[in-house]
Amino acid sequence: MRKIGILTSGGDCQGLNAAIRGLGKALLCEFGKDIEIYGIEDGYRGLIEGNYHKMKPHDFSGIITLGGTILGTSRQPFKLMRVIDENSGDKVQNMKDNYKKMDLDCLVILGGNGTHKTANLLSEEGLHVVTMPKTIDNDIWGTDITFGFQSAVDVAANVLDCIHTTATSHGRIFIVEVMGHKVGWLTLHAGIAGSADAILLPEIPYTVDSIANVIEQRSKAGKRFSILAVAEGAISKEESQMSKKELKAKRAAENYPSISYRLAKELEDATGHEIRVTVPGHIQRGGAPCPYDRVLSTRFGAAAAHLIKQKKYGFMVAMRNNEIVPVPLSEVAGKLKTVPLDCEVIKTARDIGVSFGD
Ligand code: F6P
């Protein structure tokens, strides 16, 4: 009998349930009655507090299109994992104790960057761990793509499409703020798909003058509107010279809800044009996964089951050159996959005249 635990941790995204389904069905096909699968509730919190339930075969049916996660999730910051406090005690020890109590052979963890740091810690502490890369941000080192990313690109590109019709009708300038945390993958891909005129990424600091110039040049060419796709983590050239502490203090003093609102004000002052801001926010990670993510999540789930069959632990299943491969957790944890400045997608965007505001 094999006993497997599953948990989903960090911000949710499309494809989580498809991945749970892929794993569950592959384990059931492989082991039949010789498998028990436990759903750990609300991410690491469930493992810390001992909240879990035995899953039945029908739990893995009819969920491939379902957004969110049937197991629930929570954010448990890595930096607090080692902090022993009155409420939760020694969190790492609690997780080890509950793993033992459930008598698990392996714990399968679906999550993003912070989640992988804790997964690696648990693996170093001797637990058998296998992970799957989940996030709309696509910023996990070691995999070409994470599930959730492509679905979020679809949503954000659709927002840009919708903004186009109103922007052209009114002859307005629009900023669409795209999620992605500290990296620009989502903004870059959504920006190209949604034909943004300028794309601002955290990896390429911008100047207001450069963006104002894009708007002016378009105006002069008779184009009545401009659309800017701005990553939530975008920074100006001036800010890129600051320390983290200085930047935080500057942003707090400015008191804008997000970077896009400050940029809108600066561009209004610089160009005299009226600027509107649209922030789709968490809509980008809600709803059904796109078919690409359904396939990717299913492949990751089945690959995780294969690792369990081989008793190969301490790995994340990853996509590299369109093949699913295992990558050691120690290589993944603590690294961020940013957009390389010389990548072909950025070159393509520049080739067709998209500005990056630099
Ligand atoms: O990591 C996914 C993500 O949606 C980021 O793009 C975004 O910065 C962050 O999570 C939002 O976090 P929260 O869910 O805590 O609001």
Image (cartoon, grey):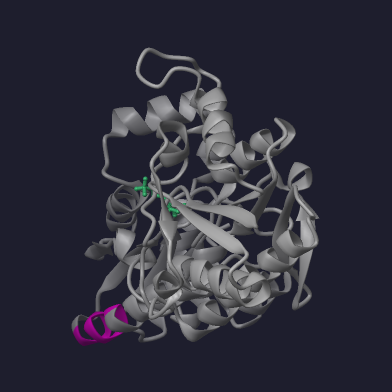
Task: Locate residue 304: give its quadrant.
Answer: bottom right
Q: What x and y, as percent, mark residue 144?
A: 70, 67
Task: Locate residue 321: give its quadrant.
Answer: bottom right
- Residue 57 vertical placement versus 251 (above, below): below
* Bounds of the magenta segment: 163-169
| Residue at (60% x, 83% y) in the render | 352
**Residue 198 or 305: which is nearer the viewer?**
305
Q: Main secondary structure of the magenta part?
A: helix
Residue 310 shows in the view: yes
Q: What x and y, as percent, mark residue 291?
A: 49, 85
| Residue at (58% x, 31% y) in the render | 96
| Residue at (62% x, 42% y) in the render | 119
| Residue at (59% x, 35% y) in the render | 100
Q: Is 88 on the left or on the right of 345, as rendered?
A: left
Q: Quadrant of the N terminus?
A: bottom right
Q: What x and y, as percent, mark residue 215?
A: 39, 70
How many marks can you see?
0
Q: What x and y, as percent, mark residue 199?
A: 50, 66
Q: Is residue 35 magenta?
A: no
**Residue 291 or 144: which is nearer the viewer?**
291
- Residue 206 vertical placement versus 30 (above, below): above
Task: Locate residue 115: give its quadrant.
Answer: top right
